[in-house]
Image (cartoon, rainbow, N blue to C red):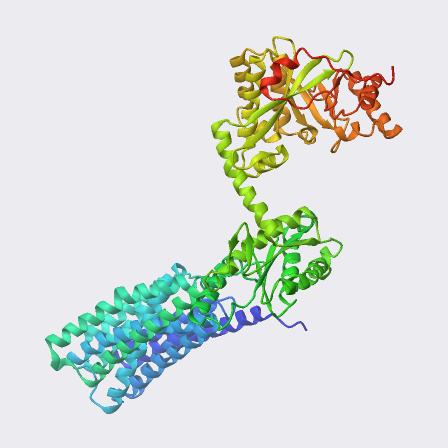
């Protein structure tokens, strides 16, 4: 026979209990009616009826043991059960004295115990203490004011048993009321049942007053409060508790409730005591002391909670979530803490040597692209796990997406000895991730130590304690840049040469910015010769820079710096404008010669480039057909590149487009037919093979033949010997350019080049 699931068993048990509670509720009223109007007029049978029926309804609707309705149903059953016993005692022994009060107190103690068990079962453990303290503080304050009222009206009991039960009943009832109020404030889904519980708990105070003094008004007030609470609990409540993740918000709500309710009540009672000192008894003074103690305990708990939250936030801010390592902030914080420790306790000798290894992992992007970000994060976590166990002297941090830092207590020699182990750890990391075990990882490492010269005359030996470790991180980053140029597996150690190169790069950036602002960069012009006549057919504009501080700077160096500093657009616009103006002034266009200017992809992507070309042509009155813009073939590798559309716009102006350095990169014949290209410039690397082997001639011959068939003009770059010129003429190349004819000349010599005729070689004629 199949065993029913736990949820089904709970529902079956709850239905049976609900029926029994309903029968008990009816029995309470029946017993009171049979006992006479005196018993029926007391709150006990009505409290029993309300509590038992409410408990029955809530239990009947509960779906599982953790259902909040099951907890509230048990509370209602315990509360109604106590008043059922009190009703029975009154019916059996109308003059039984305090027996009904004892039964009511026992029922309320049962309610209190059930609520504590419910809290421990349904609330996360860290939130139990704050919840109990909040309810105890509000409950004690309500008990304080309630007992003061009872004391003033003489409703504190006459017998010893009554004097013991009455304070206990007040404390339990007000605590239950406070728990209900807090539940209503904490979660809007518990607003109705929480309010009902609070009203039923408060109803015990006038009920106690009625029982001890015989006041009919107090009794009906108690019955009215219970009736309102019963009406609220009859409305269908929630089926689950508030999410535990909202514990901090709930605690803040309870603190607000304590501030808005408990404190004013306490101050009101203190004012009452000042006005009527005779109304106080020992229990009232004890309640005042209890409230103050609870306030102190709540303050300590709040301070602890805030400290725990602050510690958690600090840990989150300093920890990389993906790997569990400290992040860049943690590295900075550890450096600051280390400096403070060294300042407070300076070593007797020199500062202890520490070395920084910056590790940049290569290959994670392939895992990310194929397997997704989760697999990539798992691989990086495996790398981090390996790095943390390499050397007990090293502390690992994750300082970037694919960058880690190791701070080693040792010198550069120790670090370079550890570097191969670091590389092996990175390479083996994918093997620990089943989905990524077939992917290869590698790394480059930059190493720098503390202390010593940093190049260019800068020395850190006079820095304060620990200051040079921050400088070592910057130095390791510079070494890492150098390691990248060596390819994966490279370990670069920072030295004076790296520092000098960095300082020169910074100075280059500063001076280049100033030169572009002042317009002091020069443009030289190299002739492009007609291979059949030797006449100058056009010129290529080339940027040249001689700085007052740096001297002559090679184009390869300052163009690279311009790319790093986002100065490419400004540099390209300066060369274009300067070249067209100079050529127009020298009569280049009037002589029918052309002008070629190099253009980068960055310029083509910049807004308004077509308008800038149109404007400079209009300013100088230069024919668009005599201007050629040279671009590398990398522009055409992406069929959706915006640069290709810009070139089409420029070609529509009549400007010619040249493909520069053809054969130097990922050369492809496929795009030649679809692009608005008019000139094909063969790279000097192919030119150098013309006189070395037959294969070189065959390749160039193929390129020349194809370009000619497509209607393109062919220019061969880098012609340095007469033999190379002869081969170019023989293969049918129309134009040639190189040192055999002329190097790039300054603007002052441009006009004289127009009348020159160059020998193009005759070895093959």
Q: Residue at x 67, y 51 (%)?
A: 364
Snapshot quadrant of residue 264: bottom left
Q: Quadrant of residue 21?
A: bottom left
Visible residue check, residue 233: no
Seen from the viewer's position, the closer of residues 256 and 308 is 308
Q: Position of residue 324 (x, y in %)?
A: 57, 62
x, y percentage for residue 584?
Answer: 57, 13
Looking at the rendered image, the quarter that the N terminus falls into is bottom right
Apparent side of residue 372 relative to residue 189 in the rendered image (left or right): right
Closer to the camera in the image, 656 or 646: 656
> Residue 463: x and y, percent?
47, 60
* Residue placed most toward the observer, 719 or 133: 719
Above or below: residue 655 compared with residue 161? above
Direction from residue 311 to residue 421 in the image, left or right = right
Q: How many marks?
A: 0
Q: Please indicate, yes or no, whether residue 572 appears anywhere in the rendered image.
A: yes
Q: Is residue 679 left or right of residue 349?
A: right
Q: Residue reaching furthest right?
A: 694
Looking at this view, is 373 or 33 the one in front? 373
Left or right placement of residue 262 versus residue 120 in this view: left
Does 573 appear above or below 757? Answer: below
**542 vs 87: above or below:** above
- Can you give x and y, in whole percent of width and height, for residue 424 in the image? 72, 60
């Amino acid at each position: 026979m199949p065993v029913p699931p736990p949820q089904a068993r709970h529902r079956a048990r709850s239905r049976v209990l609900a029926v029994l509670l309903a029968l008990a509720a009816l029995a309470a009223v029946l017993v009171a009616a049979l006992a006479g109007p005196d018993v029926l007029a007391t709150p006990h049978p009505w409290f029993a009826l309300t509590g038992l029926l409410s408990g029955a309804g809530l239990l009947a609707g509960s779906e599982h043991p953790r259902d909040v309705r099951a907890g509230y149903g048990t509370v209602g059953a315990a509360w109604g059960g106590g008043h059922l016993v009190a009703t029975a005692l009154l019916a059996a022994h109308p003059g039984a004295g305090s027996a009904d009060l004892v039964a009511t107190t026992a029922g309320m103690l049962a309610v209190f115990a059930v609520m504590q068990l419910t809290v421990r079962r349904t609330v996360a453990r860290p939130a139990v203490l704050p919840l109990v303290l909040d309810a105890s503080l509000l409950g004690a304050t309500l008990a304080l004011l309630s007992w003061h009222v009872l004391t003033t009206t003489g409703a504190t009991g006459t017998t010893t048993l009554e004097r013991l039960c009455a304070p206990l009943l007040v404390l339990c009832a007000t605590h239950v009321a406070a728990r209900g109020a807090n539940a209503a404030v904490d979660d809007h889904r518990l607003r109705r049942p929480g309010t009902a519980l609070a009203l039923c708990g408060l109803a015990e105070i006038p009920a106690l007053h009625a029982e001890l003094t015989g006041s009919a008004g107090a009794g009906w007030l108690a019955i009215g409060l219970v009736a309102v609470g019963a009406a609220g609990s009859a409305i269908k409540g929630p089926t689950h508790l508030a999410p535990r993740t909202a514990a901090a918000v709930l605690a803040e709500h309870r603190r607000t409730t304590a501030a808005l309710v408990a404190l004013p009540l306490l101050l009101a009672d203190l004012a009452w005591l000042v006005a009527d000192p005779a109304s106080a008894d020992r229990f009232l003074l004890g309640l005042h002391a209890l409230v103050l103690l609870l306030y102190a305990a709540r303050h300590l708990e709040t301070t602890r909670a805030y400290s725990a939250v602050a510690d958690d936030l600090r840990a989150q801010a300093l920890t990389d979530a993906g790997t569990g390592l400290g992040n860049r902030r943690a590295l900075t914080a550890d450096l600051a803490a280390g400096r403070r420790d060294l300042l407070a306790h300076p070593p007797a000798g020199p500062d202890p040597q520490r070395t920084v290894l910056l590790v940049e992992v290569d290959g994670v992007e392939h895992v990310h692209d194929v397997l997704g970000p989760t697999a990539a994060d798992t691989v990086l976590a495996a790398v981090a796990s390996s790095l943390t166990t390499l050397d007990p002297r090293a502390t690992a941090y994750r300082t970037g997406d694919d960058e880690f830092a190791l701070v080693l207590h040792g010198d550069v020699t120790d670090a370079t000895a550890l570097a191969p182990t670091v590389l092996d750890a990175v390479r083996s990391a994918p093997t620990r991730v089943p989905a990524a075990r077939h992917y290869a990882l590698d790394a480059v490492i930059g190493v720098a130590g503390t202390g010593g010269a940093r190049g260019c005359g800068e020395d850190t030996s006079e820095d304060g304690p620990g200051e040079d470790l921050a400088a070592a991180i910057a130095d390791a980053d510079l070494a890492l840049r150098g390691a990248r140029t060596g390819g994966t597996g490279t370990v670069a150690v920072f030295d004076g040469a790296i520092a000098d190169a960095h300082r020169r790069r910074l100075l280059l950036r500063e001076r280049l910015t100033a030169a572009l602002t002042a317009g002091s960069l020069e443009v030289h012009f190299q002739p492009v010769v007609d291979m059949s006549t030797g006449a100058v057919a056009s010129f290529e504009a080339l940027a040249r820079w001689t700085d007052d501080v740096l001297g002559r700077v090679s184009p390869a160096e300052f163009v690279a710096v311009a790319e790093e500093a986002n100065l490419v657009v400004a540099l390209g616009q300066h060369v274009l404008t300067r070249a067209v103006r100079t050529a127009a002034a020298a009569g280049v266009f009037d002589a029918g010669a052309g002008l070629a200017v190099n253009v980068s992809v960055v310029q083509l992507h910049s807004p308004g480039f077509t308008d800038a070309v149109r404007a400079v042509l209009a300013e100088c009155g230069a024919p668009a057909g005599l201007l050629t813009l040279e671009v590398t073939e990398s522009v055409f590798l992406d069929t959706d590149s915006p640069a290709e559309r810009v070139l089409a716009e420029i070609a529509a102006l009549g400007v010619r487009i040249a493909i520069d350095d053809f054969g130097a990169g990922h050369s492809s014949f496929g795009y030649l037919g679809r692009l608005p290209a008019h000139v094909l410039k063969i790279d000097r690397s192919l030119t150098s093979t013309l006189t070395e082997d037959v294969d070189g001639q065959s390749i160039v011959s193929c390129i020349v033949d194809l370009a000619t068939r497509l209607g393109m003009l062919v220019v061969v770059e880098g012609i340095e010997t007469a033999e190379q010129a002869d081969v170019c003429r023989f293969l049918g190349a129309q134009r040639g350019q190189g040192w055999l004819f002329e190097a790039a000349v300054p603007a002052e010599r441009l006009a004289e080049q127009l009348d020159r005729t160059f020998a193009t070689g005759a070895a093959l004629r």
